[in-house]
Amino acid sequence: MNDRRLDAGMPARGRDARSSTKMAETIRRRSGELLKSAKKPRAVMRRAVTGNAETRVRDYVKIPRVIRQIDKMSFCAGVYGLMMTEYIATRVPERFWMFYAVAMPLIFAARGVYYRMIRWQYFLYDFCYFANVTALVFLTVKPKSVMLFRCVFAFANGPVLLAIPLWRNSLVFHSVDKVQSVFVHAMPCLMTWCGRWFGFGDDVGRMNAADLNADVSVAEGCVHLMVYPMFAYLFWQALYLVKTEYMDKGKLDQDPELMTSLRWLASDRKSSANKSALRMMRKIGLFGEDEFFDAGSTKTKFVFVMLQLGYTIITFIPIPLCYSNYYAHTALMWIAFGSSVYNGAVYYIDVFSRRYVERLQIAEEFERERSSSMNAKEFDRLIMTPID
């Protein structure tokens, strides 16, 4: 009451100044509270709409048309690539090695650029890439070496080919990355299938089918198809461990966003490979019931190295039969490739159709909201406003 009396006795100018000062203080305080409270909802909203708290919604809503166009182009490229591969393999199988020698370096280059952008470049040190590089060395440096061809044959039709069903590679044509993954694992097998049963052409500097059909003793065949490939695999494993655990260990420890195969497998607790491996380790007592794989622990690294070694040994077992029998080799190739087709069908029907439509609907709804009644600043202000 005293304040009201004092205010009543003050000149109008003084009362206005005092009111303005209080209002300014209130606005500053309220603005600070509003901005502070707005940060979390804005991040939540961005993550809900774009999948990334750092991506602005107004930038994201421009994407749908681009997404559709890129996916259409990728789908066409994947289908045409498969058609070209099939045509060359069936029409001129003795020349398929030329197509492989041109296509694989291009795939590697494209994948290298893309993987570096998303910080997956350490996947390029995996065994499947080592096997493909070995195949390219055979084709360009040692094309007359029967021993090297058999080593490549074991790589291509053993651990590399059977990784398709194991890791659920999917022939999803609109995804360049998924199509490339199938090609990386299937093309070496197809190249060795063409070379083994149809030769590498009439060039005197290369082997023909007769050279590869020459009689070979059981001991020599086992050495070339299992022992030498195993030594080569161990050589790759040693190089990989030196690279990731010694040369680049500090870099990988400082940047957890850099993805490696071990980090991927250890963190993906929903994958069948992770579940099966963890179940096995718990059964033998190496891991506790409440213990999970940790990519940074020595125990997890040891487990995955040994599991991959066991997988490689097992996948080498059918190699002598595939090398000596056309039908066994063809059946194995078709089973593995068929699994990628089935996985692609499952992805399109069960996963992609729902996610793709939902994603575009959300983005288009925000785009309509913004364009119909708001400018960009008003749209951002609405997104930043806390929801009570």
Image (cartoon, grey):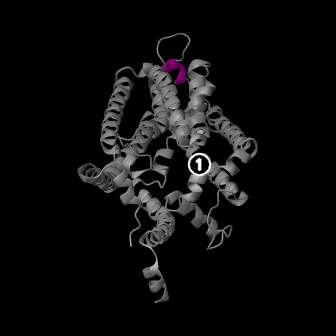
Quadrant for the C terminus in the image: bottom left
Q: Which residues are drawn in magenta?
A: 208-212
Residue 99 position in % (x across, y down): 44, 22
| 362 w.r.t. 134: above or below | below
Q: What residue is disc 1 on?
A: 261
Q: Is residue 325 magenta?
A: no
Which residue is located at x 34 percent, y 25 percent?
87
Which residue is located at x 36 percent, y 47 percent?
344
Residue 196 position in % (x across, y down): 49, 27
Nearest to the observer: residue 54 or residue 96: 54
| 134 w.r.t. 37: above or below | above
Secondary structure found at label 1? helix
Q: Main secondary structure of the magenta part?
A: helix
Name the residue at the top extreme. Answer: 204
User: Is any atom of residue 150 visible in this view?
Assistant: no
| 88 w.r.t. 284: above or below | above
| 4 w.r.t. 43: above or below | below
